[in-house]
Image (cartoon, coloured by chain):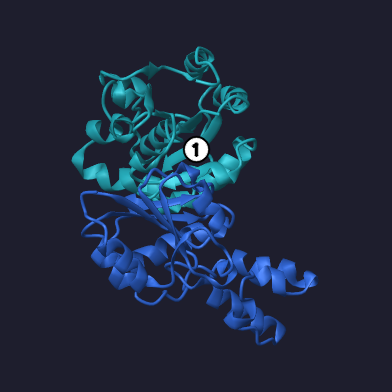
Chain colours: A cyan, B blue
Amino acid sequence: LKRVCVDMDEVMADTLAEHLRRYNQAFEEDVTVDDLAGKGLWEITPQDRQKELRAFLDAEDFFEDLPLMPDAQDVLKKLSTQFEIFIATQAMAVPNSLGPKYRWLQRHFPFIPPTHYVFCGDKRILRADYLIDDLPKNLLRFEGQGLLYTAPHNLTATGFVRVNNWQEVAEYFAAIPESS
Amino acid sequence: LKRVCVDMDEVMADTLAEHLRRYNQAFEEDVTVDDLAGKGLWEITPQDRQKELRAFLDAEDFFEDLPLMPDAQDVLKKLSTQFEIFIATQAMAVPNSLGPKYRWLQRHFPFIPPTHYVFCGDKRILRADYLIDDLPKNLLRFEGQGLLYTAPHNLTATGFVRVNNWQEVAEYFAAIPESS
């Protein structure tokens, strides 16, 4: 079976929605996804709020209850019958996320066994045929075929095979012969 | 740089010593490493204690304070100037170990950045040139060159390049040209 690595934040989980929610609540702002086109939340918020922006992520409960990306469950469930799925998430920059990420995966993706979770940093370490990720940096380091999962911060990135949602992920892999 | 993955339990950390200590204390036994020759603790202890054996590992504090393997720090520090070191540990079978393992690595191996920690299950996912591991199963799945780090449970395993201690690890890599 071909091996597919899937990133969590902003690919399986809508991490940005939760980050925006906490930011807007704390500062009584109304920043939306549309305000971000091509940028990260870090780039469009005042310098003196960067510490809080980071503190939201470090909170014990931030990664515990993230909303799901639409169709991620259904599409991954189908893909897991034809491909070997590994979850590969940058968890080491936020050590408090380790336990919550494990529990979130078990709750929402029970068909992927914990043996196939990879909590890592530098994604050059992954030996797989495909990587679905929202960070161009990760795809550039990966030795297999990368798929850039569209997120507000990567809208202007070029030179990648891009998937805009999980339906497009399904279509991409439907066109690949299983044995190839 | 060539990439070297290093397992934690029974390679960097003396996990077995702590497991034995808790077992002996709980059951007022005196099992030693010598009693294990060729076997795991699971195999030489009574069936009705398997649940407790597992519970020791699941305890929140089990992985917090494991003793270091002799020379692991010194040798890895030297190796890290000539090779790219990743820590690759089977953490997913004991989710309570995730946080403690992260903290243990930071405390004892501050020269290895968290970007180079890999908390995983199935080690087929690792893209590296070398893997130092005590489990024959992991080495068989790994696509690069495996080094079996001697532990009581693997004494009878054959067909592997074996290293008996960290001095032998140093000697093995000293014989490898950096650019090869």
- The answer to whether residue A99 is seen in the rendering is no
Q: Quadrant of the N terminus of chain A?
A: top right
The residue that appears at 30% across and 68% down in the rendered structure is B171
Element type at mark 1: strand
- The answer to whether residue B105 is seen in the rendering is yes
Q: Is residue B45 left or right of residue B77?
A: right
What x and y, as percent, mark residue A86? 51, 37
Residue at the front extreme? B159
What x and y, as percent, mark residue B126? 43, 45
Q: Is residue A179 left or right of residue B114?
A: right
What x and y, as percent, mark residue A99? 52, 52
Above/below status of B31 relative to A71: below
Residue at the right extreme? B48
Q: Which residue is mark 1?
A: A87
Above/below status of A50 relative to B34: above
The residue that appears at 36% across and 70% down in the rendered structure is B168
| Nearest the eye: B17 or A180 | A180
Above/below status of A149 relative to A63: above
Above/below status of A79 relative to B96: above
